[in-house]
Every structure is written in C-alpha cells, then in structure tokens.
C-alpha cells in the first residue's frame, strides 16, 4: 500500500501486513492507540503547514516504527521521541488519516 499525503515527496510504502496500515485504518474511526489524546488534539489544532524537512523526519519515524512488530514497542518509541519529533510525527499521521477519510468519502472534499 502506498500512502500519499500531497505529492510524490510524501509517498510511504507500507507492507501488506503492516501494523501501521491497521493503525491508520483505526484512525479513520477516531481511535489512535499509539498517541495520547493531547497529542492528537494538538496535531489537529495546529494550522501550520509541514515543511519538507519535517515531512522527511516523519517518514524516517514511519520506517523505524515499521520495524517494531508490537503496538507496545511502537508506542514506547513514540513516547521516547523528543517532543518536537513526536509533534511532527503525530501531525503527519493525522494528515494521512484525514487523506484516507477523504478517499473513502470524496463528498467531504
């Protein structure tokens, strides 16, 4: 599965049995098991666009998370990130989820 969040720069490949893919699907229903609620609210309320460097950093974090097989390890990794990196990743993740929702319901555009 290839995820696009606004251009070729943001392509992320997730394998067929990807836990991240499942987490993105859960996010479309408002459930974010990797994140504290405050992190998600902050990501949603941030109006600033992500720059190229921030997007690349988020993609690096995605690649590392893909290596961890359990949600517990993924959550531990995200919790241990520097606050700035965590905010970048959560914003990027929420943006992907929003894109997936729009893909499912194009009338929302």
Image (cartoon, rainbow, N blue to C red):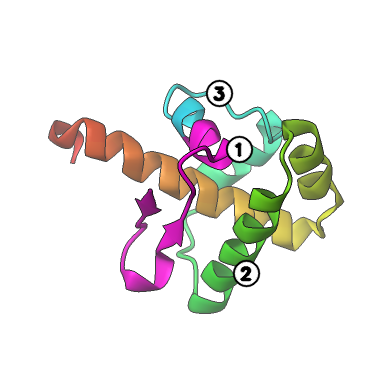
Residue hosting label 1? 40
Q: Does the segment drawn in magenta span residue 21?
A: yes
- Mark 1: few, some, or many residues within 10 Å (few <14, many ≥20)? some
Image-based side of 107 in relation to 5, left or right: left
* Element at label 1: helix
Quadrant into which the C terminus falls: top left
| Residue ID at (84%, 41%) | 76
Give how far across and how far down residue 77 sits, in percent: 81, 48
Question: Which residues are the magenta region?
Answer: 1-24
Q: Is residue 45 visible in this depiction of the protein? A: no
- Closer to us: mark 1 or mark 3? 3
Between the C-alphas of marks 2 and 3, the distance is 24 Å
Marks 1 and 3, how far apart at CA: 10 Å
Viewer-proximal residue among 102 and 45: 102
Residue 58 % position (x, y):
59, 62
Disc ID at residue 57: 2
Q: Which of the marked residues, 1 or 2, is nearer the chain's N terminus?
A: 1
**Distance from label 1 to label 2 (Cα)?**
18 Å
Identify the residue at horizontal 52%, vertical 68% (top origin): 55
């Amino acid at each position: 599965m290839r995820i696009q969040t606004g251009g070729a720069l943001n392509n992320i490949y997730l394998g067929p049995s990807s836990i991240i893919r499942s987490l993105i699907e859960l996010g479309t229903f408002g459930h974010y098991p990797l994140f504290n609620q405050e992190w998600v609210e902050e990501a949603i309320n941030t109006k600033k666009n992500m720059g190229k460097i921030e997007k690349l950093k988020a993609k690096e974090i995605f690649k590392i998370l893909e290596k961890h097989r359990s949600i517990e390890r993924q959550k531990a990794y995200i919790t241990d990130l520097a606050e700035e990196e965590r905010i970048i990743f959560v914003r990027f993740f929420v943006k992907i989820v929003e894109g997936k929702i729009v893909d499912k319901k194009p009338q929302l555009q």
